[in-house]
Image (tube, rainbow, N blue to C red):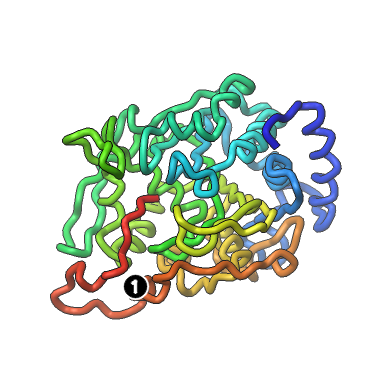
Amino acid sequence: MTTISRRNFLRTSVMGGVAATCLKPYDTLAAFGKQDNYSSSVAITTGDNRADLAFRALKPFSGEIAQAIGSRRVVLKPNNVNIDIQLASTHVDTLEGILEFLQSIGKTGNVVIAESAANGPTFDGFKNFGYFRLADKYGVKLVDLDQEPYDIIYVFDEKDFRPHAVRISHLMLDPGSFIVSVARMKTHDRVFATLSLKNIVFGSPVKDRGFTFNSSSKKGTVSDKPIMHGSGFRGINYNLYSMSQQLHPHLAVIDGFAGMEGNGPNDGTPVDHRVCVAGLDWLAADRVGIELMGIEFSNIGYLNFCNQTGRGTADLNKIHIIGESISAHKKSYKLSDNFKDQLIWKNPISQNLTTTHYPNFRLSYT
């Protein structure tokens, strides 16, 4: 789906939305997440239209989302780890489905699509993936976070156990921003899987103009994204956890229409999954995403740390699923080739720790 007329979009979405929300009815929207022992609610939709999946996944939360946004700026944060590979990056149709939803609740007056692409100029990715038509159609602003103000935050590095400064986009830290993580469902070569939280934490560090992760990089330019990775599997998991208090989505939308398995986040292969996950509790949404991918949750270090410290809900028994069931749409994603190495975060730390302990710690930065 590359173009959408509002009339046709709403015609297909209304019936699908009715079907999805009627599967588990409630008396009021305020009741979501408060029935029985539930702490959070997550919606799962399936179908053949990416934009429609996102629209229907968000629809049950209309009242809550409108209230949470209030007068704040809405920041749609795609995951463009690679400006040339569509499978690795957020699809324009998912963004369009979200914009249609925001329009339906009257919240398109102050919306930006903001990114700091990992491997090249952000606007090149926006152009390659067709984002500019969204600016024309919905009046949203496209923002390159690398060209915006930043704040300094300090993160952990396991090579020396000292704080290291990272430039973080001010827009992503601003209390006046309502952050929507528009993520892809992908396996990962450092933390098993990348979903809504990782998209925010590792998309927020900025890079210099002209920096690329190849020989064409302008001399003297740097990216702060590697610093956030903490120089190892322990460091990256801890930094994801520690940054989640300041950098996290207020709304998670996870596109699993075509997931990525194997050596993500760049070099994996497609999974025809045709699902979308959405929720206001990002940890609950990521937990459901992990389950849909058939990945053992106990292996995801940063999400377990967040669960242990109450950053959200990760207990499936306390997550109310709206719409489709997990069991009906669960697939077993092939993991990264180095998945056994990634599990070192579970082990006690050894003396004289150096990067030689991590022979398979590959360089990929979102």
Whether residue 338 is visible here, answered yes or no, is yes
Which picture quadrant has residue 314? Answer: bottom right
**Is 25 positioned to the left or the right of 100 in the image?**
right
Which residue is rendered at x = 80% and y = 51% of the image? 20
Q: Mark 1: which secondary structure? A: helix
Residue 357 placed where, x, y %? 23, 73
Which residue is rendered at x = 19% and y = 54% of the image? 163
Which residue is rendered at x = 50% and y = 41% of the image? 78
Residue wearing tag 1:
345
Does residue 138 lie above or below 251 as drawn?
above
Residue 348 placed where, x, y %? 28, 80
**Is 30 positioned to the left or the right of 288 in the image?**
right
Amino acid identity at mark 1: Trp
Which picture quadrant has residue 206? Answer: top left
Identify which residue, 308 or 182, lies in the foreground: 182
Which residue is rendered at x = 74% and y = 64% of the image? 325
Residue 158 placed where, x, y %? 22, 64
**Is 245 positioned to the left or the right of 44 in the image?**
left
Residue 140 placed where, x, y %? 55, 24
Whether residue 279 is visible here, answered yes or no, is no
